[in-house]
Image (spheres, rainbow, N blue to C red):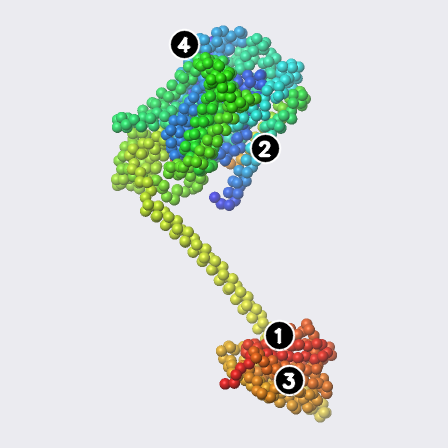
Amino acid sequence: MNNRSSRTQNDRKGRLISLFLIGLLFFNFPMLGIFGKEDKWGSIPGLFIYIAVVWIGLVLAVYWVMRDISGRPDKTPPP
Amino acid sequence: MNPLYIILALIGYVGLLFLIAFYADQRATRGASLVRNPLIYALSLAVYCTVWTFYGSVGRAAEAGVGFLPIYLGPALFAPLWWIVLRKIILISKNQRITSVVDFLSSRYGKSTWLGVLGTVVVVVGIIPYISIQLKAIAFSFQHLTHSGRVPGPVVEDLPFFLDPGLYVAVALALFSILFGTRNLDPNERHEGLVAAIAFESIFKLVAFLTVGIFVTFGLYKGFGDLFQQAWKLEEIHSLLDLKQVGITSMDWFWLMLLSLFAVLLLPRQFHLAVVENTSTDHIGRAAWIFPLYLFLINIFVLPIAFAGKMLIPPALAEPDMFMVDLPLMNGQGYLGLLAVLGGFSAGTGMVIVSTIGLSIMISNNVVVPLLLRTSTVREGWVDDLSKRLLGIRRLSIAIVLLVAYAYFKWIGRQYTLVSVGLISFAAVAQFAPAIFIGLYWKRATRIGAMVGLSLGFLIWFYTLLLPTLAEVHFMGVHIVENGPWGISWLRPDALFGLKGMNNITHAAFWSLLLNTGGVVLVSLYTSQRTLEISQADLFVEIYKYQTGVSDYDVIRRRASLQDVTLLLNRFLGEPRAGSLLQSYSRRYGKDLSKEKMADPDLINFAETHLAGAIGAASAKLIMRSIAKEDPISLEEMFRILEQTQEIIRYSRELEHKSAELVQTTHQLRQANERLKELDRLKADFITTVTHELRTPITSIKALSKILQENPGLPPEQRDEFLGILVSESERISRLINQVLDLEKTAVDRAEWKVEPVELNKLIQHSASGFRQYLEEKQIQLRLELPDAPVWVSGSEDPLTQVFVNLISNALKFCDAGKGIIRVGLEPGEDRVVAYVADNGIGIDPKDQQTIFGQFVQVSNNELGKPTGSGLGLYISKRIIERYGGRIWVESEPGRGATFFVALSPATPG
């Protein structure tokens, strides 16, 4: 493995770990406690919107970090 | 709805599953795999969503609002880390042909048999209730469908078993699992049909859930806004959105997330699909975001459906776990209700099929085979081909697991909600987390540490979670739960050591994982590892190292006869497969096995790994031990390894040394090159200056001669003047040439310079005498201040004479005619003799005092006009004096004359 690819490997690992930690922060108290039952956007509960947005954000971020891992269907059978 | 339709639909669905599985298997044999792509991989992981998700989430949401969510947030959060953790687990598992999560554990800790048995017990006890709730939910949903939302008839559990749909479901699932999950002995050979069917079920249940969700949200209401608007009006629903009012603490939330985070990898079905059936680690790249996206989609309608159920179904009839089926039925959507039931069916069957297959592999590989191997009668009575018998054991295990799960559902599981039973199972498999995750990164974790940790965790889990459920169905007295055993209140299962204020799952998870982790770490620190443990730990922790190359040497060397190894492979894997394995081995390593009598350690390792793929690491180790003699590494071998290592170290030191030398040489060469360049430049300068100095007089000689030649009638006085100039210019040239020759003389090798005692006062007198006529002409006084006794210095006569001639003629140049006084003297001393030549001329500017000893340096001065002389005299003098180890310098104040000093070493006359 040359330097460059090992560097991007380490970068990727760092990014993934940071995503995990950010998710851990946003999906836990006290962040969750910010939205009480009275908070709503339109008539939709604030908590519902908050969790959905963070969730989708996490999915997009992981997609972005992993976008160059090909994962194409492999034609060759494993040994 | 007519039960016949339902039965037909179910049979149709199961038929479709069989078809898909069959088709995928066919494709696999043709080499055109359907399932080797990241999408199918991610979908197969969605087997995580069981009836618990399909029915239970809605049920839980109806009671606790978003309280159902931590179970999905944990895995969604963990997904980014899969690229790091899951990838490592897969690489290890492919290298070691790991067959299950328990096999992984046993293999990491020295292929321990007892750890395998203990792990299997934990999993089986922990998972059977989980399987049973799937059966229960499926049976329950049929009943709801047949009663079309009216008041339900007799509870399913009370039906005689032959009328109970749960039984038939269990039988059908057992058949499917046996057909598609036990095709190959080695699970690493992959069950493509199984994976394809599971992926299909994942799509089906998602579509079913979304369809019901869209129907409820957009059919019964006018979208999310409208539904929530109406829900706000009911205080009962309104308060569900307040986490405090539904009784969810931050502790509960966190621990549920943590448990589910572990479960998504460690549950037998998850491990089986994520690791054992994985075909390429690259697939993780996409699964890491597709899987969380799937979880998001399947959860988005949970709250709306739960709220709608609470608003639309009268509380007397409301069974929140069945809102998914009841909501369409009560609104006259029979087929949608059927779709929901089929969706739930797909969620349940997927889980049951993969779990039973996973459990059957563990039971056969980690319990049955090792126990059989330990009884000698079986070992001696080995028949030809054990592979069929091993598959038989696995098929039997599947049937038994499903039967036990069905029995649990019939007798115990009836009064628990889907979620509460599921969480108990999560807490059970989470007990593997400390030993596995610590063992993945810390080599020192020992087998005994893992045993102690896992046992402690399992005991606490059993005591705090399982025991209370048994008490409630009167297997034992309720008083133990309420008051603690023997009335000791701090031993109460729901408030162990007096810890209160958490729900039972959080409480159990906290104590069991704390003691479990503490056990693994602390006991490991105080116990040692056996050889095999050390080598396995190294392989697990440093798997990336083993990916690129083989290990440097074997820690354990084993010998066995080739015949025994072949016999063993034939018996356990069947002759055709054993034959092809041995062939591939001899091809890969270029060894002709037909000529060998003994199997080398490599072949034994190869055979053991492939046996491990079929029967588990611990069993393979036991079997190999029966035929192979283990030579614990001998003293000589150890010395050889040490010597090799030392040699390598020495060699690298030498290399370092050599390269340092090389650097030094390069440095020296560079310096020498610089000096050469400098000399070259000086020489070029020198030649330029000399030719310039020569050209000036030659030009004037040429010009004057030409005038004389062309003008014969020049007045005599002018002609004399010209001739005078011609003579002096010629003298100047000859002087310059002489000096250049002198310089050349000083440049020759030191060895050719004679060093002899020279009488200095005599030498100075002699040098001065040459100037007598000139002094008289210019009326300059020359005073000699010499001692009477002879002063001897080391040097040689001619060069030293030249030095003093130079200095005196120099002094003469700067003295005014008529007023000039030059003093030349000598001061003898013990360790040096100093001679001086002083004048009272114009003196030398301090800035010039250093430079005047250089080549062709001529001090120019406005009063003096153009300097005379070549600019070489002082340079030559300096070279000469330095040749004799002496020193020359000048002291001067401008306007008050200059004094040149020459210091030489004294000598004794010889």
Q: Label 2 belongs to which residue? A: A22
Q: Which mark is residue B824?
A: 3
Q: Is residue B864 left or right of residue B219?
A: right
Q: Identify the chain of the residue marked 2, using the numbered disc in the image.
A: A
How far apart, in angstroms, are the residues tagged by discs 2 and 4? Answer: 53 Å
Residue shown at 55%/79% (left/top)?
Answer: B905
Mark 2 nearby-residue class (10 Å; few <14, some 14–19, many ≥20): some
Q: Earlier in the sequence, mark 4 or mark 3?
A: 4
How far apart, in angstroms, are the residues tagged by discs 3 and 2? Answer: 93 Å
Image x and y of residue B321, in percent: 53, 15
Q: Is residue B328 left or right of residue B356?
A: right
How far apart, in angstroms, are the residues tagged by discs 1 and 3? Answer: 23 Å
The amino acid at mark 2 is Ile
How far apart, in angstroms, are the residues tagged by discs 4 and 3? Answer: 141 Å
Q: Label 1 belongs to which residue? A: B854
Task: Single out the mark in the foreground, 4 or 3.
Answer: 3
Mark 1 nearby-residue class (10 Å; few <14, some 14–19, many ≥20): some
Identify the element where label 4 is drawn: helix
Task: Single out the mark in the foreground, 3 or 2.
Answer: 3
Q: Check if mark 3 and mark 2 are on a common chain.
A: no
Q: Label 4 belongs to which residue? A: B162
